Every structure is written in C-alpha cells, then in structure tokens.
Amino acid sequence: MNIIPYLDFHPKISKNCSSKRWVSIIGRTTVGEHCHFEDLVTLRADGETINVGSECWFGEYATVHIADSAYGATLGDRATVGRFGLVHGCTIAEDCLLGEHAVVMDNASVGKGSVVCSDSVVPPGKQLEPGWLYQGVPAKPVRKIEATELEELRNIVKSRKHGAGSEWVLSKRPVAKINHEPGQGVAENSSDDSYIAPTATVVGHLEMAAESSIWFGVAIAARDASVSLGAASNIQDNSRITLDSGEHLKIGERVTIGHNVQLNACVIGNTCIIGMGSTIGKGTIVQNGGVVAAGAVTAPNTVVTEGMIWSGNPAKQSRPLSEENTKLFSVGVDVYKQYSKNYKKNP
C-alpha cells in the first residue's frame, strides 16, 4: 500500500486494513477498520476529503476521487465497490453495492442498502432512494432489493463468479490484461514539467508536452506503438490505453481523459473531454471541443463532432456543449496543472 501525503495532509488508515498490490491512499483520506483493497485501487483526496467507513471492500482498479474545492467523497460502513468502479465527489451510504464499471458522479448520493448495477452511471446531483436496485445510463430504479439478495450480489462482486444474479453486478465490458509494473518503460518524456504518478505504468513510446500529466494506476500498453499527450492534457487515475503494434494514440492540448477510461488507437483533438468510465473504440476521432459523456462507449471509427456531447452505448450525438460547460472544463484542466505542481513537492 502506498500511503502518499498531499501538501500538508496525511492519510489516516486503521491498522487492521488489508490490501494487494499498488494500492494508493492519498492526502485527506480517512479509512475505517477492516477495509480491503484489491490491486491498483486509488483513493485520492487532494482537493477535498475522502471518508471511508469500516468493513468496506474495493475491487481491482476501483477509484475514489473528489471534486476540487467543492465535493468530497464519503462511503458508509460495508460499502462495496466492484472492479473498475468509480466514486467521484459523492456520498455512498452504508451497505451499498456498486457493480463493476459503475460510476457515481459529483454531489450525487446513493441511499442505504442500494445496488448500482454494473456499467450504470449515477449523474451529478442525483439522489437515489435507499433499498433499491438501480440500472442504466442514467441509473433508474428497477425494483426493491432485500438484504439477503444484496449479500448474494456482494459475494458475486468479490468472487467474480458468474451465476444467478451475476448479470446485475458483473460487467461484460472487456478489460485488457496488462502486466502492471509502475514506472516501467517510459521511452520519452519530452518535458521536465510534466508529471507521471508513481503507480502509473508505461510500455511503448510516450511523448508528453509541457504541463501534461498521467495519474495513479494508469496503464499504457503500447509495445511497438506510440502515444502523444498534448500540452496541459491529463490522463486520470486507473485509465488504460491498449494499442497494437504500429498503432498511435494522439491526444491534443488541454484535454481531460477522465478516471477509469479505456482508450484504443484513436485521435482526440484539442480541448476535448473524455468522460469518466467511458470506452473509446478503435479509430474514433474526437474533433476539437468534442465531449464523450461518462460511461459512454464509442463504436469503432466514430466521429465525435466538434463542440458536441456524445452519450450512450453506442455513443450518439446528444446536445451542444454549453458555454458554462466549456468554462468548467477549462477550469478543470487548470486544476490538474496545479495538482501536478503540488505532487512534485512530495515526490
């Protein structure tokens, strides 16, 4: 377990917690008793606080982060977050279960004893009632759930065994197997003022422009392939890039690749947003200012049009990007530039 301070803030973790490899607990994080963390879990409390109750469980590549200077993240006792699940600046009540690849966004709350099914997205500000099973993008109530079934689903998430009920909480979305050895294989880092977090792994040719950043648990598997990251762009925690030999991924300037994103060979223009938990199919082109919404999946060779938000699976054009959206996204890029500077103070 990597216990990482952020500025003057140090995590507080109960001694009887357990973890596997490359887990990162950062900054203003407090963790209760008997919590367990599978490989590459990241709890990152830099711009706000994270509070985790007792007996919580986090699957591989699960991420908990905050909304800078706005919303912390809280998980109640016995909360369970499945493989590749994401909790972002929100509240997860006690006894809740998030299925694999589920995303809960800023200022949302999930009521006690509820299940957010695999591949589902709880939008910003949404308040989910306790004791229900929710599914979809956006997540909607399906039916009430009893404590016995909740416990059965919790065991399925932990064991990853398919069977009765597993379709609710185990994702069919493939995740490429990557031999994760943090810090390995960085072929080229073209700027001294870029940042690579200590649990990121890079295999292949990587070019990073000034003020760009790659964050905790990110995996780039690009042997005999190449990745270029433009100025002030960032690839956030537990995102993964998988390229075949001879392929190239080009990311423009001032781009945000959200947490837990899966990227294939594609071209992403300037000032784009690739939303949390999304998957970008091979050959996708995201034009300047294009946005792929949280949890969306672009089909191969999709063209995400300039200044538009695309959502769904397969992703389709949804609506134009508002002026307010554009301003908020630009602020987010600047926040990450400052994060990079701050983390460098505690290498």
Image: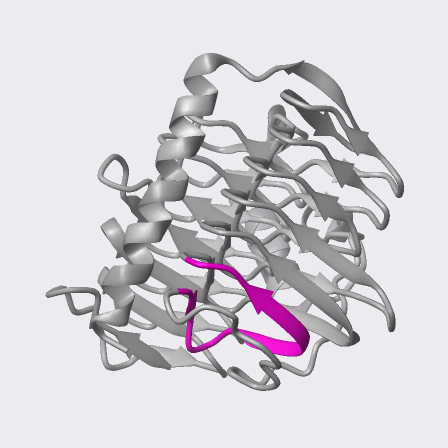
**Quadrant of the frame with the C terminus:** bottom left
User: Does 205 appear in magenta?
Assistant: yes
Q: Which residues are magenta?
A: 194-210
Q: Nearer the viewer, residue 264 or 113?
A: 264
**Residue 202 seen in this snapshot:** yes
Q: Nearer the viewer, residue 120 or 274?
A: 274
Task: Count how many numbered circles sit on residues in the image.
Answer: 0
Q: Is residue 288 above or below residue 150?
A: above
| Whole-percent x, y for residue 136 in the image | 68, 30
Q: Residue at x 58, y 81 (%)?
A: 186
| Whole-percent x, y for residue 332 in the image | 38, 38
Q: Residue at x 70, y 36 (%)?
A: 296
| Whole-percent x, y for residue 100 in the image | 64, 53
| Whole-percent x, y for residue 278 in the image | 66, 43
Tell me which corner region of the image, top left, top right, bottom left or bottom right, holds residue 112: top left
User: Residue furthest toward the left?
Assistant: 8
**98 to the left or right of 31:** right
**Quadrant of the frame with the N terminus:** bottom left
**248 to the left or right of 211:** right
Tell me which corner region of the image, top left, top right, bottom left or bottom right, holds residue 168: top right
Q: Which color scheme did the rendering employ for the protein?
A: one colour
Tell me which corner region of the image, top left, top right, bottom left or bottom right, holds residue 67: top left
User: Does 328 appear in magenta?
Assistant: no
Q: Residue at x 37, y 61 (%)?
A: 43
**17 to the left or right of 30:** right
Q: Nearer the viewer, residue 319 or 88?
A: 319
Q: Residue at x 42, y 48 (%)?
A: 95
**Residue 66 seen in this snapshot:** no
